[in-house]
Amino acid sequence: MCKLQKQYDFYRRNKSALLNDYRNLYLVISDSLEVRAFATIAEAYSYGSQKLGLGTFMIQKCSDKSDNVQSVSNLGLRKA
């Protein structure tokens, strides 16, 4: 199983609890399945890339809507 699948499965399994705490926030889910929440996707990406390193985290918006997975490369975010 790839890393992102492990992180995404964690999100899906724990979605109800995560919604209680982090509704409408952007979650950074690390390889070790630790969760941090941010108001914007840019803040989430900045934290993940600087503190965890690229390729070691997933960003997921925590919402009731169907799970949309979006590639960071499509967000216009670039590492400085």
Image (cartoon, helix red, strand yellow):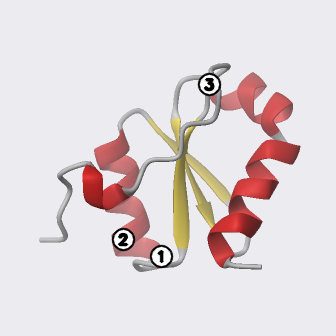
Give the Cα separation between the discs numbered 3 and 1: 24 Å
Q: Earlier in the sequence, mark 3 or mark 1?
A: 1
Q: Secondary structure at mark 1?
A: helix
Q: Which residue is at the front of the view, 27 or 68? A: 68
Residue 67 point in image, percent of width and height: 63, 35
Q: Which residue is mark 2?
A: 49
Residue 60 point in image, percent of width and height: 55, 45
- Of the residues shown, which amino acid type is indicated by label 2? Ser
Residue 15 point in image, percent of width and height: 79, 36
For this orientation, the residue located farthest to the left is 80
- Of the residues shown, which amino acid type is indicated by label 3? Ser
Residue 13 disc label? none
Residue 52 disc label? 1
- Of the residues shown, which amino acid type is indicated by label 1? Leu
Q: Residue at x 28, y 61 (%)?
A: 73
Residue 63 disc label? 3
Query: How many other residues sit within 10 Å of disc 3, few (<14), some (14-19) or many (≥20)?
Result: some
Apparent side of residue 61 relative to residue 16 in the rendered image (left or right):
left
Apparent side of residue 9 relative to residue 42 in the rendered image (left or right):
right
Give the Cα separation between the discs numbered 2 and 3: 23 Å
Residue 24 point in image, percent of width and height: 54, 24
Residue 45, quarter of the rendered image: bottom left
